[in-house]
Amino acid sequence: MPYQVFIETFGCQMNEYDTELVRSLLTKNGFVFTGDQSQADVVLMNTCAIRENAHNKVYGHLGECRVLKRERKVVVGVLGCMAQNLKKELMESDPVIDVLVGPDGYRQLPELLTRALEHQEKSLAVDLSEYETYEYILPDRGPGVNAWIAVMRGCDNFCSFCVVPYTRGRERSRTPEGILEEAQSLASRGYKQITLLGQNVNSYSSENWDFARLLTAVADIPGIERVRFTSPHPKDFPPSLLEAVAQHPRICRQIHLPLQAGNDRILDLMGRSYTRKDFLSLVEDIRRRGDIALSTDVICGFCSETDAEYLETYELLKALEFQAAYIFKYSERKHTIASRKYADDVPAQVKTERVARLIDLQKDISSKLNHRLIGQSVDVLIEGHAKKSRDQWMGHTESNVTVVWNKADSFTQPGNLVPVAVAEASASTLFGLRVASPLSLVCPD
């Protein structure tokens, strides 16, 4: 009987993509996957090191695994960024873990699991690689409309709050040939939207290929309706990339543009390599090119941030009116520059209050922007049933706003790009009144 594996993923889209790589590597080596943890021979957690909440969830699941180990000889593995960043602490303090594998060690996982299962050997693979990109390994994906492609791995920015350069290593890009082959395979299987991934995705470079050229080439593949990318850095937006977003009909006119803070001293402490003025100039350049939706990330309560400095961030978000903002309170990560150089001295309650104020502000902005669309038609890529009702469809606009509407006919299905008339709106969702024929089926006049 083949060994059964249960895997759970914590964190970002890159972690989801890595789980698909792990599934592919293990399946090729005779393992099978199960959705029932109680039936598994192996329990894997693919982890994130960015947020405190993800850490806490992993530690909670390790507690559950202790119970499983007492009941039967299940093998427990921790994969990904947390495994890389906290390898010493995890292996020394938690005997429940049998296998510890960082983001560059997945090729070794089948052998390590086999040794743990058959010989009760504990092992780890946590060396960072200068070259590993998992080129030409097609991830094991389930059916769907959306797919991710990691075009590069690692990061060279060394923002002081971020652990990624220490958990995923330095930047290295995949070949354009491998990326386009993967994208063409996705198109042939019916995927309609591709999101290109990287810790600093727009710094992609391979010989004479830059990110703008790669993005355009993926969008040119027949069968692909929409292409997105995340996460970029504000320092890497040459005119060619902005023109591609503004002009190509299948590149979504939406950019995620992480701000992190609106005060120059805090930006400098964060190591962000741009000023408030630089960021404003980039936003103005983007918006001069047409109706391109922007979203952002913000960290509240970074080391020594004062009330006045926080207020600069608040006022900047208020002025720029992002479509969406992902707002977090600063949590110190081990082995980062900030953890070595600066005191995490903003009280927890102050961080919480600052986050709450920004969330309230952003809800008001998003609600205002969404309400402007009432009475208009928006193009939506159908992704599947709505969470709350199988009598409704759910999808996203080009600007990445969620849309929900009642099913009204038999010809629409996931993967169709359809116009939806907006009847109501909230801060996070548009509610459709009706849907016309799929755009791909509408005959020209």
Image: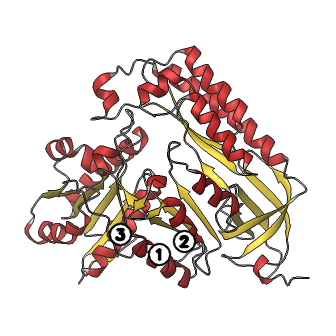
Name the spot of residue 263 as percent of width and height, x first.
Answer: 55, 23
Q: Who comes first in sequence, dot 3 or dot 1?
A: 3
Tell me if residue 179 comes above or below residue 323 in the rendering. Answer: below
Name the spot of residue 386 as percent of width and height, x first.
Answer: 68, 64
In the picture, measured across the screen, residue 169 lies left or right of residue 424, that is: left
The nearer-to-camera label among 2 and 3 is 2
Residue hosting label 2: 218
Question: Where is residue 405, by image quadrant?
Answer: bottom right
Which residue is rendered at x = 22% and y = 64% of the image?
A: 74
Could you tell me if residue 119 is visible in this image? yes
State how many labels appear.
Answer: 3
Three-letter code, disc 2: Val
Which residue is rendered at x = 38% and y = 38% of the image?
A: 162
Residue 4: give its label. Answer: none
Query: As rendered, which of 89 and 419 lies closer to the eye?
Result: 419
Residue hosting label 3: 21
Q: How is the image coloured?
A: secondary structure
Question: Where is residue 188, by image quadrant?
Answer: bottom right
Name the spot of residue 306 as percent of width and height, x first.
Answer: 52, 15
Estimate the spatial distance between the alpha carbons at disc 2 and disc 3, rounded to whole Å: 20 Å
Residue hosting label 1: 180
Disc 2 element: helix
Tell me if residue 351 comes above or below residue 128 in the rendering. Answer: above
Which residue is rendered at x = 64% and y = 36% of the image?
A: 281
Q: Who comes first in sequence, dot 1 or dot 2?
A: 1
